Image (spheres, grey):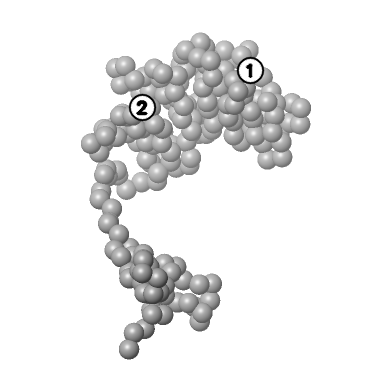
Amino acid sequence: MRDQGFISGASKGRSSRWDAQRCVNLYPELDDKGVNIAALVGTPGCTLFARLADAQYRGHWVYSDTQLFVVYGTGFYEISTAGTVTSRGTLTSGTGRVCMSDNGTQIMISDGAGKGYIYTISGASFAAISDADAPTSDFNLYLDQYFAANKQGTFSYQISALADGTSWAAADITSSDGDPDAITAMMVKDQQIFTFGPSSIES
């Protein structure tokens, strides 16, 4: 006797009484002869590419085709195409989402708990931004050779010095004041900065 009902989809139904079967690393393949016979075909497994410390993943940034940067716990790491993990710096905070962007020579990291960090590709140097005018931010981006970062908890954002994320001026600030609410995200489209709040979007 042939039981064709055993081979079916790869996920359970909403009700286990209706469909309780589950496929793990298998997928059904129908016979091309059209006689409604199927087989369960195995899928290749995953291989370990890189291993980091047992900590919280917080964000990553693809700098180039050969350079991936990851914040994991308090660590800032570079991962090569061969899966080699190299520590590049240490943050003072160990949890919560981070935001990263780059200007071609520097990567800026905002963690919402401090003034941010700059990793300089040439020389592989990592340091907290020490400029007293730099904003405490949890979001940053890059546009026209400037970093822009929100001033956490406000509807304002600030820009860095030209091509230098380590230098900030208190006067280089603007606000999303058309319908002001705290900036929670930012993006660039058509050479404009758009700011997002809980109830508004502005450019």
Question: What label sits on residue 187 in the rendered view?
Answer: none
- Whether 68 is drawn above or below 119: the answer is below
> Which amino acid type corresponds to the residue marked 1 in the rendered image?
Ile
- Say left or right for 196 vs 14: right
Q: How many marks?
A: 2
**Where, by quadrant of the figure, is residue 119 drawn?**
top left
Q: Residue at x 68, y 26 (%)?
A: 203
**Where, by quadrant of the figure, is residue 14 drawn?**
bottom right
- Residue 141 visible in image: yes
Q: Residue at x 38, y 80 (%)?
A: 4
> Which amino acid type corresponds to the residue marked 2 in the rendered image?
Ser
Give the farthest residue toward the bottom: 1
- Residue 134 visible in image: no
* Residue occupied by mark 2: 64
Residue 140 image point, x, y percent: 53, 27
Front-most of 32 and 11? Answer: 32
Circles 1 and 2: CB atoms closer than 8 Å? no
Q: Secondary structure at mark 1?
A: strand
Q: Residue at x 43, y 69 (%)?
A: 9
Residue 46 image point, x, y percent: 28, 53
- Whether 54 is drawn above or below 174: the answer is below
* Residue occupied by mark 1: 173
Query: Where the N terminus falls, by quadrant?
Result: bottom left
Q: Residue at x 47, y 12 (%)?
A: 163
Residue 47 image point, x, y percent: 25, 50
